[in-house]
Image (cartoon, rainbow, N blue to C red):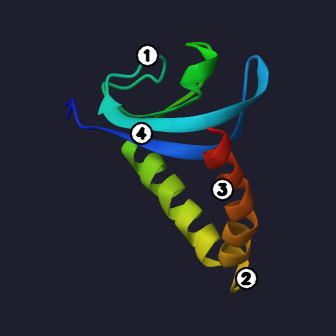
Amino acid sequence: MCTYQTEKIALRGSGKSRRGWMKVTEATVYFDHPVHFPAGHALMIDVTDPAQGADARIALELDPRSARALAESILRTLDQLPAGLLEEFAARQAPARRANQLLG
């Protein structure tokens, strides 16, 4: 059943689409009827950069167990990072964010 519950989150990263590598700036997550996956419903994840138009999209259609396994794997991987690595990364990104705010 479709929940019509949709979440959008901001992203900072890159993804590979049919056009090659692209910047990704947001993800939309929802549960709905898939376009390609042969199931009645699936968890959908669209990773996009809306500034690049409709073609700048990477789409996933996952069965619920696969979606949960992916989410848990991501969290386990992040939990295993060496102590301080996330803080170090955030500190290196802070000057770039401040410069972008001043320019933007």
Of 3 and 99, the residue lying toward us = 99
The image quarter in which residue 87 lies: bottom right
At horizontal 59% and vertical 76% (from top left) the residue drawn is 79
**Front of the two marks 3 and 1:** 3
At horizontal 37% and vertical 33% (from top left) the residue drawn is 42
Mark sitting earlier along the chain (3/1)? 1
Q: How many marks?
A: 4
3D distance between C-alphas at marks 4 and 3: 40 Å
3D distance between C-alphas at marks 4 and 2: 32 Å
3D distance between C-alphas at marks 3 and 1: 41 Å
Q: Which residue is mark 1?
A: 35
Mark sitting earlier along the chain (3/2)? 2
Mark sitting earlier along the chain (4/1)? 1
3D distance between C-alphas at marks 4 and 1: 13 Å
The amino acid marked with disc number 1 is Val
Q: Position of residue 27 (x, y in %)?
A: 49, 37
Q: Which residue is mark 2?
A: 82
Q: Position of residue 12 (x, y in %)?
A: 63, 46
Residue 80 vertical placement versus 71 (above, below): below
Asked if disc 3 and disc 2 are in contact, CB closer than 8 Å, the reply is: no
Of 92 and 45, the residue lying toward us = 92
Of 18 and 90, the residue lying toward us = 90
Disc 3 secondary structure class: helix
